[in-house]
Image (tube, helix red, strand yellow):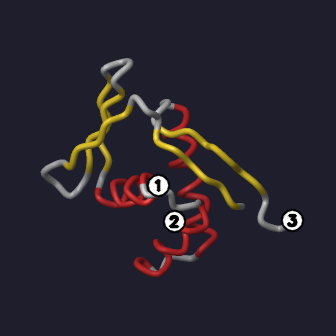
Amino acid sequence: MSAQFSIHPEVRTTPSDEDGSVLIQLQTGRVFSLNGIGAKIWTMLESGASFDGVVDALNREYKVPSEELRNDLDSFINELARKNLLQVTARSDSSN
């Protein structure tokens, strides 16, 4: 799968004291906390990385099987989108 994402325009990010990040959804006032890996993924998504690009970067750094990374990243991204923090701007099957 290849996908592109954009951060919801009403979300602000600030680093936390523990190598993570804090996300603030300005419309609702809700605050979300990301651990170190979540913050790393968020930073990649902010910079315009694709789904496959994030998987490749994490695979190089953590040596986790690609299928496991894909499943975990897909779940994480779906959760961010569900909470209206991230918008999926394009999604296609890379096998086409």
Reading the chain from its start, which is encountered first: label 2 or label 3? 2
Q: Residue at x 33, y 54 (%)?
A: 39
Label 3 residue SS: loop
State the quadrant of the C terminus.
Answer: bottom right
Rendered location of residue 28, percent (x, y) = 37, 18
Tell me the tag on residue 45.
1
Kindly check if marks 2 and 1 are in contact, taking CB atoms under 8 A apart as contact: yes
Reading the chain from its start, which is encountered first: label 3 or label 1? 1
- Give the crowd class for mark 2: few <14, some 14-19, many >=20 residues within 10 Å: many
Kindly check if marks 2 and 3 are in contact, taking CB atoms under 8 A apart as contact: no
Q: Which residue carries the number 3 mark?
A: 96
Rendered location of residue 78, percent (x, y) = 57, 42
State the quadrant of the N terminus.
Answer: bottom right
How much space separates mark 2 and mark 1, taking CA atoms? 8 Å
Label 1 residue SS: helix
Is residue 49 shown above or below 33? Answer: below
- Give the crowd class for mark 3: few <14, some 14-19, many >=20 residues within 10 Å: few
Residue furthest to the top: 28
- Give the crowd class for mark 1: few <14, some 14-19, many >=20 residues within 10 Å: many
Residue furthest to the left: 17
* Residue type beneath disc 3: Asn
* Residue type beneath disc 2: Val
How much space separates mark 2 and mark 3, taking CA atoms? 20 Å
Q: Residue at x 56, y 39 (%)?
A: 87
* Residue type beneath disc 1: Leu
Q: Nearer the viewer, residue 69 or 44?
A: 44
Tell me the tag on residue 54.
2
Rendered location of residue 85, percent (x, y) = 45, 35
